[in-house]
Image (tube, helix red, strand yellow):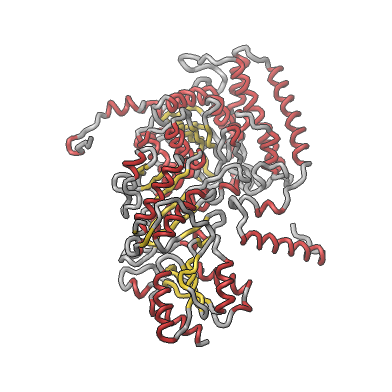
């Protein structure tokens, strides 16, 4: 089985889906000859031609609006936003149009587009190449939001997104685009929407996280085990909405302690939703406060990004807090 | 082949000729407000089609008046009146082939009528009763897949890039159709207008863009919407020919649209049509135009009315008598009144529609919330609380 990084796994997912289904079209800025600025679409133009790999002018709202039109025609557009930080121009098309097309028309029309975009920090991208805006999309009824943490998942999840009948925002943590390599099957497999996974088993604390923070959380869990013998479970949600409620509840039945880790700022971040959900539905399971380890409530900084983002020290501190409560 | 920009010049004469710039600043008109033919050559249009134009406009006007009334009666949440602008929706629609698609906006009842959508379906939608094809999620807008009409958008101009994407789809699939989209003068200031024309201009897509320039975006006049001399001339920058037409002259709208749609289908690229009209009524039933424009201005526009003008033309040409015009009006007036009565007596939608059609399946969060709603119903019953 070939060993790949996430970029290669995503590229393979696109290639396989485009071979499988002639309706799949890739569009975005620099996705053609350039192969995308991170090379996720490398080689697709050569294999599938200009009608299925479309270089667009520099307009995020245009890319999404046109993708919606393509989907209404019956195509399956996979639109690339070069950096999720530039998606805001397209926000109206995503939130007002793609997300609501089915509801607005009583199901007569749908716009099942896939919006792929590199996201998150860790590559010294500064304020406008590092953001984690997943909460805006999770908050919007009608959208599915996903974020993979490893190459194997990235391939199966992108395939699920492309086959979905709902619009999907597919966020790719660029800091782990090339840092993790693992075996990725060259055959067809799908990781269903809504299914998380246990990234590390444990019985004292549950960390709910996703994307690049899965790996930082696992490191913090290992440190806590080494220092104190505490057993920390790490859940990789994979799909942020609809999130895997049962996986979290099952883990909490075991641990009774919940930490949520994400790069996005804290206030009204996705952690707030998970904390509130557990407080409403399963407060009896909790043996201590729910703790969020997140980016600070500031714009993403150029300097000291590793201190701004959740890191091993901050997550370890949260584990200590909840264990010593 | 890469073209060296330092060694490239363009010819103004070529641009003026190729993009027919004169048409973008003129006013294409076939019949004048008195119903006289002013075009050099009167188009040869079959009587049946002329009759369709007329009845579609009449039906639009009658239905439009009813929707206003129904809003006042509390049966319809909101209405954006079409009065005075009927020739555009009707003219563009009848100019298209039946396989062409239309992406209208919320002031285009004429599109639906001319494409064969019934008054009943339009009323069911606006009343949001049990037969509402869109199941009560939004007001004023409609679309119909089987009539090849895309759903209009409430956020102004958002349908423009959808139409362009749809045309791109047709181009990729090799289907020779035209895609026509209509939007107001205000929409030309939104990013979708620029993105749409820009993209269509680059890829020479089969799109017909129609600006329904009714002079007012709520209270902002067209003069404050753009510094451009006309809206039609905006096509130049995108390499898209523009034509400014009298939008209250259904024949001019028809001919310009037919020509543009033919160009689109023949692979000659997009066209921008500015259809000059005037919004006789308020922006919507929630608007009060006396706050920002004078009654004299509105009064002065009455003589350009598209229906009166077309009636004069039909009578002048000897196609219909004054008596026959009245009969047609009365016939549709009573037909539509009957349909209105039928539609307002249909039962309402079930409350559960709120939870439907959000996704292709109902995820667990909505199952939980639906359950929550049902619990609230029980307590309402138990405590006698009424929530409307």
In the displayed orientation, state which residue is furthest to the left. Answer: B7
Q: Residue at point 59% right, 13% down?
A: B317
The reply to whether residue B221 is visible in this rendering is no
Quadrant position of residue A294 = bottom left
**Quadrant of the snapshot with the N terminus of chain B:** top left
Q: Residue at point 50% right, 35% down?
A: B181
In the displayed orientation, state which residue is furthest to the front. Answer: A1
Quadrant position of residue A227 = bottom left
Instruction: Find residue B10 and report its horizontal and vertical position in percent.
Output: 24, 31
Q: Residue at point 45% right, 75% down?
A: A293
Q: How many marks?
A: 0
Relative placement, left or right, of B329 versus B162 is: right
Instruction: Find residue A277 and report its horizontal and vertical position in percent.
Output: 59, 70
Relative placement, left or right, of B352 versus A124 is: right
Relative placement, left or right, of A101 versus B174 is: right
Instruction: Find residue B274 and report its horizontal and vertical position in percent.
Output: 46, 32
Q: Is residue A137 above or below residue B155?
A: below
The reply to whether residue B169 is visible in this rendering is yes
**Quadrant of the snapshot with the C terminus of chain B:** bottom right
Instruction: Find residue A59 and report its horizontal and vertical position in percent.
Output: 38, 47
Q: Is residue A230 above or below residue A273?
A: below
* Residue closest to the eye, B147 or B198: B147
């Amino acid at each position: 089985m070939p060993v790949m990084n996430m970029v290669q796994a995503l590229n393979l997912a696109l290639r396989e889906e485009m071979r499988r289904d002639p309706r799949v079209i890739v569009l975005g800025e620099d996705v053609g000859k350039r192969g995308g600025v991170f090379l996720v679409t490398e080689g697709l133009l050569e294999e599938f031609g200009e009608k299925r790999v479309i270089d667009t002018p520099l307009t995020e709202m245009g890319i999404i609006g046109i993708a919606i039109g393509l989907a209404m025609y019956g195509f399956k557009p996979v639109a690339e936003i070069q950096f999720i930080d530039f998606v805001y121009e397209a926000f109206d098309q995503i939130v007002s149009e793609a997300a609501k097309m089915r509801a607005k028309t009583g199901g007569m029309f749908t716009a099942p587009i896939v919006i792929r975009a590199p996201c998150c920090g860790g590559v010294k991208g500064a304020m406008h190449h590092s953001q984690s805006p997943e909460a805006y999309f999770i908050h919007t009824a009608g959208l599915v939001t996903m974020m993979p943490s490893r190459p194997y998942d990235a391939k199966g999840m992108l395939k699920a997104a492309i086959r979905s009948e709902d619009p999907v925002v597919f966020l790719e943590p660029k800091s782990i685009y090339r840092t993790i390599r693992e075996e990725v099957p060259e055959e067809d497999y799908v990781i269903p929407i809504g299914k998380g996974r246990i990234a590390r088993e444990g019985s004292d604390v549950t960390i709910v996280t996703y994307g690049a923070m899965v790996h930082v959380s696992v490191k913090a869990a290992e440190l806590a085990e080494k220092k104190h013998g505490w057993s920390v479970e790490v859940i990789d949600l994979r799909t942020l909405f609809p999130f895997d409620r049962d996986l979290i509840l099952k883990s909490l039945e075991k641990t009774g302690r919940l930490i949520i880790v994400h790069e996005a700022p804290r206030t009204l971040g996705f952690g707030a939703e998970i904390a509130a959900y557990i407080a409403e539905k399963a407060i009896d399971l909790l043996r201590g406060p729910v703790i969020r380890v997140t980016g600070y409530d500031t714009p993403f900084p150029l300097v000291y990004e590793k201190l701004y983002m959740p890191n091993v020290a901050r997550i370890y501190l949260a584990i200590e807090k909840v264990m010593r409560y | 082949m890469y073209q060296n920009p330092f060694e490239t010049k363009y010819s103004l004469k070529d641009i003026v000729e190729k993009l027919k710039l004169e048409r973008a600043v003129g006013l294409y008109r076939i019949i004048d407000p008195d119903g006289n033919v002013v075009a050099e050559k009167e188009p040869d249009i079959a009587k049946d089609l002329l009759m369709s134009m007329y009845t579609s406009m009449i039906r639009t006007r009658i239905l439009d008046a009813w929707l206003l009334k129904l809003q006042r009666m509390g049966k319809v949440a909101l209405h954006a009146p079409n009065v005075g602008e009927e020739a555009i929706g009707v003219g563009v629609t009848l100019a298209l082939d039946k396989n062409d698609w239309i992406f209208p906006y919320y002031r285009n009842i004429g599109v639906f009528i001319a494409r064969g959508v019934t008054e009943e379906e339009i009323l069911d939608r606006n009343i949001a009763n049990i037969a509402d094809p869109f199941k009560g999620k939004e007001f004023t807008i409609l679309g119909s897949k089987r009539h090849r009409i895309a759903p209009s958008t409430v956020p102004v101009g958002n349908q423009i890039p959808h139409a362009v994407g749809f045309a791109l789809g047709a181009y990729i699939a090799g289907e020779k159709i035209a895609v026509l989209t209509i939007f107001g003068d205000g929409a030309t200031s939104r990013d979708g207008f620029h993105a749409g024309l820009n993209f269509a201009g680059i890829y020479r897509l089969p799109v017909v863009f129609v600006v329904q320039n009714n002079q007012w975006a709520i209270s902002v006049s067209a003069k404050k919407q753009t510094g451009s001399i006309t809206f039609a001339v905006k096509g130049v920058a995108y390499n898209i020919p523009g034509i400014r037409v009298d939008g209250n002259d259904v024949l001019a709208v028809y001919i310009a649209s037919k020509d543009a749609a033919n160009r689109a289908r023949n692979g000659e690229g997009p066209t921008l049509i500015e259809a000059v009209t005037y919004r006789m009524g308020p922006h919507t039933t929630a608007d009060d135009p006396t706050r920002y424009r004078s009654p004299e201005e509105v009064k002065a526009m009455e003589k350009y009315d598209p229906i009166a003008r077309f009636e004069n033309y039909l009578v002048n040409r000897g196609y219909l008598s004054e008596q026959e015009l009245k009969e047609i009006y009365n016939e549709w007036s009573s037909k539509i009144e009957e349909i209105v009565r039928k539609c307002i007596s249909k039962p309402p939608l079930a409350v559960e529609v709120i939870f439907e059609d959000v996704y292709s399946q109902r995820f667990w969060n909505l199952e939980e919330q639906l359950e929550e709603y049902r619990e609230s119903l029980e307590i309402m019953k138990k405590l006698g609380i009424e929530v409307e």
